[in-house]
Structure formats: C-alpha cells, structure tokens
C-alpha cells in the first residue's frame, strides 16, 4: 500500500520550504481560513473536558447537527441517526469495512476512497466521466455498471467535488436517484464542501433518495478545522443496522472523538445564521480566485471548468499533448513531477484520483494564500480579475504559479 498522495505532497513541500525554497503549494486541500472565533473560544472553555464520550458522539452535538439539517434542508433528522467520528475520512473507511461491498466510484474521485476499498477487501468499479460532462457521472453510465454487479453496492458521490470543483444540479441528482432505487444502492453523499457552494444552491441526494443515502460531512472545510478531526454521518432510519455495525467497529478502534473538540463543535452548529454569515467571506474569496485561475488557463488552451464550490480546479492539458510529449511528458504523473521539479509548483496528477494515467489532468488546490488577510480584504476580491496589482498583493503565490504555468505553455 502507498502513502496517501495528498499527504505525501504536503510533506514533500514542507521539507523543501524548510530548506529555504519557495514552493507553490497547490497540492494539499486545506482551508486557509481561521476557525470562527466563537468556536475557538468554545474549545478554550472546554479544554478541561476529559471523559470518554459515547461512541456515537456527544448527544448535545448530535442534536445540534440534527437541527442544522432541519434548518438547512428541511430534512427531519433525529440526533439518534447521527454518528460523530474523527474526520469523515474515518467514517467512510468504517463504512467500507463493515460489509463486503462492491464500491462504485466516479473517475475522478477523491484520493482516499479507492485505497480504502482495497484495505477493506472490497471490489471496486469506476464510472467514467468526461470534460464535456463536467467530470460528473451520467445516470445511464451508472446503470450500465450496476447491471453487471450482484453484490451489495456502495456508491460514493462527492459534490461540490474534490478534485474537480464541479457539482450536481437537482435534476441530475434525481436521475441518479432513480438508478439508485432500481439497483438498491447504498450511497455515501460526501457533502463536506456543501457550505462552500459559492451560490449556496446546494442540493442533496437525500432529498431524492432518502432511504439509501448517508450524508457525510464535517468541520474540516467550511469551518477551517481539518486538524481538529471531527466529521459526521447522517443515516436514514432504513440503514440503522449499518450504523450499529459501524458503531461496534468504532467502539473497538477510536472509541470516541476527543471530548473538548466535540463540545466546541456544538458552537459551530448551533448559531446557524452567524455561521452562514461567517462563510460568506471565504466563499467570495474562493470564487474570485477560481474564476481568475480558470480564465487564465483557458486563455492558453488549458481547458478548465470554473469551480462551483470548494477549493479545487481540474485543468486538462490535452491540447498541449504534442508539446508535452516532445519533452517526454506522457502521463499526468510526469506532468505533475515536471511542474514540481521545474517550477516548484506542487499539484496532484489526475491518476491519483482514478483517471487513466495518460489523461493529462491535474488537481490544483487554490489555497496557498493568507486566509486571515484575505477575509479582511474580501471586498477587494470582487475586483480581482481587473487588477494585476491586487493579485500580487492578495494571492501572490497563486498569481505567480498561474503565470508560470501559462507562460510555459503559451
Ligand atoms: C471529498 C472529501 N471527502 C472527505 C474528506 C475528509 O475530510 P475529513 O476527514 O477531514 O472530515 C476530504 C478531505 O480532504 C475530502 O476532500
């Protein structure tokens, strides 16, 4: 088994930085924004919480999260169907472990789903996508893959998406839901970037396929608290047995999430309006950067969809294949290695996300900037496109990295 490529690139970059190099860190998707002050204060207040908590999570936190979903989705969730884990990554892994699944993944998909399937001895099938379809699966293609599989099927669908920055419209989710009903899929709807949907028009698969959908989310992205390690699953009542099996496995492994973190996270979910207000500024900043970078890439024929949410762009260098092959770049891995060695730009190759090696796509995480300064100056980001000076001031490294890539291929 290999080390997770996303953590690996982060550690490689940090080593170079420690030796005095400038590295453009577009490899690791960590929120650059500070955790909201009220949530940090809640952690300080709760530092003395030291007892083990229930395996499924602190009841008052589960109630707060249930209320959040009622407010947000008008989805009647009860606290008993919420499970807290040390990051949603761990919960997704537990879910893969407790049953002999046949896992279905769009290609591309987030880096850890497929290795987790291998660790859990699950079978795996990819559902392919295209640039034209915004790297999203089509219901018909999903149905074709499902027809060939007898075993219990687990689809993991992430939107807004890492690595592509794209998301599904309500009608697309409805079509997927119809296939899911027909083939009795269990679905993990990985909605961890839901609150970073730029226009706020996030739709959940739960609305169309409640009986088989588990929502996966947490505080790593919207709340900037990746290192706090807290995520949650929302189960439908129909999947209570699965939830219980996961709880049994959790009880024999991590026992519970750190108590101070659980108490502090109540704050992150109780004041819905205040948190929605907090997220407005990061969204303006992220949207402006995504638009700027995607526009620059498209101008030099690096095809790139603008992002709908989250931290990522997924440019396709296919139009430059002739030039790239003349310098011995035939795969996305070689392309990423070249950018790292030549320009110190850290990215991840499309192949880390289940794409065919020869597809010349990269994932760029556009988070290498000072999040606190960006929030103070968030109004300036709305004028980002027109002002070269602003780009240098507000996102110097992203500006430089974008320029290096574009000039190289121009
Ligand atoms: C799509 C996606 N799902 C899940 C995770 C895991 O997040 P966490 O374990 O911090 O909740 C990440 C983190 O990068 C992600 O990008």
Image (tube, rainbow, N blue to C red):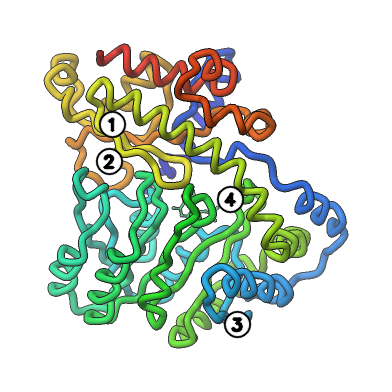
In the displayed structure, 63 sits above or below 311; it is below
Task: Let me know if residue 212 appears in the view.
Answer: yes
Residue 149 picture quarter: bottom left
Q: Pointer 3: what residue? A: 78
Residue at the spot x=42%, y=22% of the render?
A: 345
In the displayed structure, 250 sits above or below 49; it is below
Rendered location of residue 371, percent (x, y): 63, 33
Crowding at mark 4 (Cα within 10 Å: few <14, some 14-19, many 20+): many
**Disc on the earlier residue, 3 or 4:** 3
Q: Pointer 4: what residue? A: 222
Say what secondary structure mark 1 lies in: helix
Q: Are marks 2 and 1 in contact (CB under 8 Å)?
A: yes
Say what secondary structure mark 2 lies in: helix
Residue at the spot x=37%, y=37% of the render?
A: 313
Given this view, does label 4 or label 1 mark the residue nearer the observer? 4
Residue at the spot x=70%, y=46% of the render?
A: 35
**Disc on the earlier residue, 1 or 3:** 3
Crowding at mark 2 (Cα within 10 Å: few <14, some 14-19, many 20+): many
């Amino acid at each position: 088994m290999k080390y997770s490529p996303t953590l690996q690139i982060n550690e490689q970059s940090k080593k170079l930085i420690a030796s005095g190099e400038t590295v453009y860190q577009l490899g690791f998707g960590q929120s650059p924004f500070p955790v909201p002050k009220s949530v940090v204060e809640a952690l300080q207040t709760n530092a003395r919480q030291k007892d083990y908590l229930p395996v499924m999570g602190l009841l008052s936190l589960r109630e707060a999260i249930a209320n959040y979903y009622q407010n947000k989705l008008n989805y009647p969730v009860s606290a008993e169907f919420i499970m807290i884990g040390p990051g949603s990554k761990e919960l997704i892994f537990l879910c893969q472990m407790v049953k002999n699944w046949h896992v279905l993944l769009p290609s591309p998909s987030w880096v850890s789903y497929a290795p987790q399937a291998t660790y859990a001895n699950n079978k795996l099938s990819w559902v392919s996508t295209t640039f034209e379809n915004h790297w999203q699966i089509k219901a018909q293609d999903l149905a074709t893959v499902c027809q060939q599989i007898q075993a219990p099927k687990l689809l993991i669908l992430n939107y807004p998406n890492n690595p592509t920055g794209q998301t599904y419209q309500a009608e697309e989710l409805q079509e997927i839901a119809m296939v899911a009903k027909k083939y009795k899929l269990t679905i993990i709807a990985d909605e961890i970037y839901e609150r970073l949907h730029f226009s706020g028009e996030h739709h959940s698969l739960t609305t169309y396929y409640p009986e088989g959908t588990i929502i996966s989310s947490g505080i790593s992205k919207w709340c900037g608290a990746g290192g706090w390690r807290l995520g949650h699953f929302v189960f439908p009542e129909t999947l209570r047995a699965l939830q219980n099996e996961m709880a049994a496995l959790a009880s024999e492994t991590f026992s519970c999430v750190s108590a101070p973190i659980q108490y502090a996270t109540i704050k992150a979910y109780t004041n819905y309006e205040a948190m929605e207000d907090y997220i407005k500024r990061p969204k303006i900043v992220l949207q402006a950067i995504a638009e700027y970078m995607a526009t620059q890439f498209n101008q030099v024929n690096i095809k790139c969809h603008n992002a709908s949410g989250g931290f990522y762009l997924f440019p396709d260098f296919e139009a430059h294949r002739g030039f790239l092959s003349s310098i011995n770049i035939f795969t996305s891995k070689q392309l990423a290695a070249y950018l790292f060695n030549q320009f110190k730009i850290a990215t991840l190759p499309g192949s880390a996300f289940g794409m065919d090696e020869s597809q010349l796509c990269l994932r760029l995480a556009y988070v290498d900037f000072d999040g606190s300064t960006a929030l103070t100056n968030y109004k300036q980001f709305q004028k980002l496109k027109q002002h070269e000076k602003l780009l240098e001031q507000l996102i110097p490294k992203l500006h430089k990295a974008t320029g290096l890539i574009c000039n190289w291929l121009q």
